[in-house]
Image: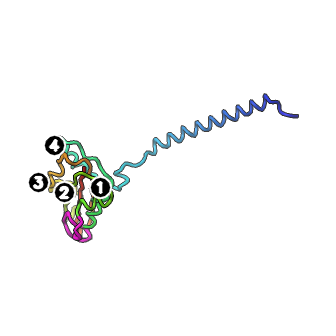
Amino acid sequence: MPIPTVVRRRRAIKTGIGLLVISLLAAIIARFYMMYSAPPSPEKVSGLSDQETEILGLVNQQRVRSGLRPLKFSPRLAVVARGHSYDMAMRHYLAHNSPDGVAPADRISGVGIGYRTVGENIYMDDSADSADVPQRAMTGWLKSPEHRANIVSDKFTETGVGIAHSADGGTYVTQDFVH
């Protein structure tokens, strides 16, 4: 016996409502998933170490004490800074320009970072106790007029920090600044 039109319509409506409920539940679940699995912070994406994070914090504390806004962390600058620290550690030199003549501005523009002003702080520590490197680097930079000027300059808005360890136990720190 054929199914009456009214029954077919009721079944179609029930099926439609069922699909709508399932779609709404899926949307709610997706929304909660997206809320609680937020993308990682730039610090985590760049693989910022605890010591690099500490230096960034110490620099921003000094800036706030000087009445300036904290610097924004740039993962791309952190990669550039870390690369320079590794280069210094592997080739055993301490200079803003590499032995090949590559300057901070060259390294930064070489990865496509645009800037108006660029600055760089470097530090080398050969102490066996590497736990206090962030504090010692900051102390050394604040004693140097040029390095201190970079830290408390209102010309800079972003920064990245990179640390590398050499085979002979030295620790090299680079902090790049841009605006």
| Residue 33 is at least partly visible in this image | yes
Residue corresponding to mark 1: 77
Residue 146 horizontal/vertical position (percent): 13, 55
Q: What segment carries the magenta color?
A: 88-102
Q: Amino acid at mark 2?
A: Ala
Image-quadrant location for residue 68: top left
Q: Which mark identifies residue 137? A: 2
Q: Amino acid at mark 4?
A: Ser
Q: Earlier in the sequence, mark 3 or mark 4?
A: 4
Say few, some or many: other residues with alpha carbon within 10 Å of mark 1 (under 14 / 14 to 19 / 20 or more). Answer: many
Could you tell me which secondary element the residue under label 1 belongs to?
helix
Q: Nearer the viewer, mark 2 or mark 1?
A: 1
Q: Which mark identifies residue 145? A: 3
Label 2 near label 4: C-beta < 8 Å? no
Q: Earlier in the sequence, mark 1 or mark 3?
A: 1
Left or right: 45 in relation to 179? right
Residue corresponding to mark 4: 66
How far is the residue under mark 2 from the one under mark 3? Answer: 14 Å
How far is the residue under mark 2 from the one under mark 1? Answer: 18 Å
Image-quadrant location for residue 94: bottom left
Residue at x 19%, y 65% (from the top left corner): 95
